[in-house]
Amino acid sequence: MNATLTRGRLTVDVRLTPDQLKATLRRDVQGGLTATPKTIPPTWFYDDRGCELYEQITRLPEYYPFRTERALLRRSAGQIAEAAGASVLVELGSGNSEKTRELLSAMQRATGGLDGYVAFDVSEGTLRTAAQAVVDEFDIEVHAVVGDFRRHLSAVPAGGRAQLIAFLGSTIGNFAPAERAEFLGEVGALLAPDDRFLLATDLVKPADRLVAAYDDAAGVTAAFNRNVLDVLNRELDGDFAPERFTHVAVWDPDNSWIEMRLRSDAATTVTLRRLGLAVRFADGEEVRTEVSAKFTPAQVASELAAAGMQAVGLWTDPAGDYLLTLARPARR
């Protein structure tokens, strides 16, 4: 974000074109389905149908993370904005920017005011729509970056104003430990002395409650999980039969995460013609589609410290289900 801001202006910076996105999909699927065990990255859940199903998931009684985070932001956004002291909000994985409005409104009311918003997401269509809505509602400069925050963090515009970089949705839980360390290290290196980082994490809780959140009674999460096979069929000219794969959600206590998997109901071979790939599944063989790690506050602080950041503020809900951590660059 430039030091001189133009209110009411939207700038879109495309770092990930549709062709590049397709190339990434091909690379991810080729590598994941030829690995042992097989994997499909959760990035590919979110086509239009996947987004619709996720919206339904957020309204399910079993799925506490979305509503808990939203309520926590509503209650704590004012304190977070004052503690951060930033006038520009940068959101990684912004999506439709629904919950973001709590932070934007709080920053607008805070001592430092609100000058700009940087929205960072992989879906250009969703990003443009959400970014324009923020411009219209808040009359601020919005810089939208179409990109993968795992690869394009350098696209976050630097400027002379303090920034609050937010990573909400407990999306950090979708990263394996080594990936988390690398990502957090990149965020830490990005922060100027007056910048702050807001990280949302889902906290450890009884396994039965966690499993229920990812395997709801209505079967919406199962449909969401199987939809990724429809994405592969469409984008890679595949012949998956999604109805022949069973949704599985299990708690892995050793890694402190939920795993979502798809289990083949019979031995089968799936062909992905655009990859020239034939994938054999044994009867009962599983492909992992997502991990969702759960944390303790001490673990969050430790991982931030390892990435060169110091936790300076903690906010949690009354039940202790969810955590928002504000961090600053460690003194160098």
Image (spheres, rainbow, N blue to C red):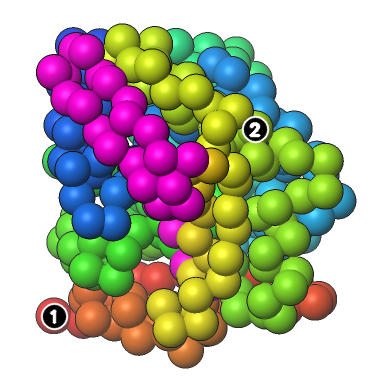
Label 2, on which residue?
223
Counting from the top left corner in percent of width and height, residue 253 is at 51, 82
Q: Residue at x 81, y 76 (%)?
A: 318
Q: Residue 209 falls in which quadrant of the image?
A: bottom right
Q: Give the CA distance from mark 1 to mark 2.
A: 48 Å
Q: Is residue 220 above or below residue 197?
A: above
Q: Earlier in the sequence, mark 1 or mark 2?
A: 2
Q: Residues within 10 Å of mark 1 (few under 14, many from 20)?
A: few
Q: Is residue 288 left or right of residue 213?
A: left
Q: Secondary structure at mark 2?
A: helix
Please give the count of numbered marks on the rendered protein.
2
Bounds of the magenta segment? 266-294
Kind of residue indicated by mark 1: Arg
Mark in front: 1 vs 2: 2
Q: Main secondary structure of the magenta part?
A: strand
Q: Residue at x 41, y 51 (%)?
A: 285
Residue 195 part of the magenta segment = no
Label 1, on which residue?
332
Counting from the top left corner in percent of width and height, residue 129 is at 52, 12
Counting from the top left corner in percent of width and height, residue 80 is at 58, 62
Q: Is residue 85 left or right of residue 161?
A: right
Q: Specify whether residue 198 is in view.
A: no
Q: Residue at x 71, y 80 (%)?
A: 206
Q: Specify whether residue 296 is in view.
A: yes
Q: Is residue 102 left or right of residue 155?
A: right
